[in-house]
Amino acid sequence: MAEDTVETLYLKLRKPDFLAMKGLSGEVPIFIHAYEATDEDAARQTAAALGTRLRHDGIACANIDLFDLVLEQLDEEGRLSRILEKEPQLGKTKLFETMANLTDAKTRLVPRLMQRLEAEDAKLSILTGVGRVYPFLRTHTILDSLQPAMMRQPVVMFFPGHYTQEQGIGSQLRLFGSLPAPLLYRPYYRAFNLAHYRV
């Protein structure tokens, strides 16, 4: 990830108007920062460095990896060791079904995420790990579940892929730069492309 991109992100996220969610016209303050999937390691380092710099500036910033959040919850519930033990016998389909059932975004992931944000008293949240929770958690279900909860602070989701907005088609999140979904199956994303956001 280019150094100028890191600096641009830092300057944008620390702006008082961004933190105050100005210019959103009542929309939820969820932003997508898309990057090439091949830059995953650099993106995770960037997210961590941004959080550190913002906290150094006195801005309470939470860095949360969604995959780590899922693992923490499964471990606390005593499920993680059982899943790992049974994984060879489950097969991919059954493992996917099990993980999808245990990690529902609305009833499990987002409530736990909200607990973490409240505990940290965050004024800004940076989420990573979107590619790591795929396919049992999909970005559109995470965003749908986040929308009612996230009105008090901006959330920046680091997304390994492309976020495009085309007239007549709408918004498309293409994880890992994959082909877009057929028009009938494209979900609606109430999230801003951070690259296009101006305060």
Image: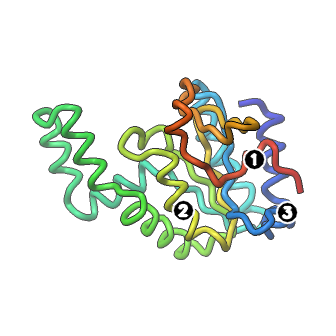
Tell me the amino acid under the disc marked 2: Leu
Mark before the other along the chain sequence, 1 or 3: 3
Quarter of the N terminus within the rendering: top right
Frontmost residue, 169 versus 126: 169
Mark 2 vs mark 1: which is more N-terminal?
Answer: 2
Cα gap from disc 3 to disc 2, whole angstroms: 20 Å
- Quadrant of the rendered structure where residue 76 is? bottom left
Q: Do the CB atoms of the residues marked 2 and 1 lie less than 8 Å apart? A: no
Residue at which label 3 appears: 23
Of tags 1 and 3, the one toward the viewer is: 3
Query: In the rendered view, does 7 fall on the left or right side of 160?
Result: right
Residue 25 lies, with reference to residue 83, above or below; the image says below
Whether the residues at callouts 1 and 3 have beta carbons within 8 Å, the answer is: no
Q: Disc 2 marks which residue?
A: 146
Disc 2 secondary structure class? helix
What's under tag 3, amino acid-wise? Gly
The residue at which mark 1 appears reads as 194
Between 30 and 6, which is closer to the camera in this rendering?
30
Relative placement, left or right, of 84 versus 144 is: left
Dot 3 lies on which element? loop
Question: Label 1: how many residues lie within 10 Å, few (<14), some (14-19) or many (20+)?
Answer: some
> Mark 3 Cα within 10 Å, few/some/many (few <14, many 20+)?
few
The quarter holding residue 109 reads bottom left
- Residue 55 lies, in percent from the top left, at 71, 63
The kind of residue on which mark 1 rests is Leu
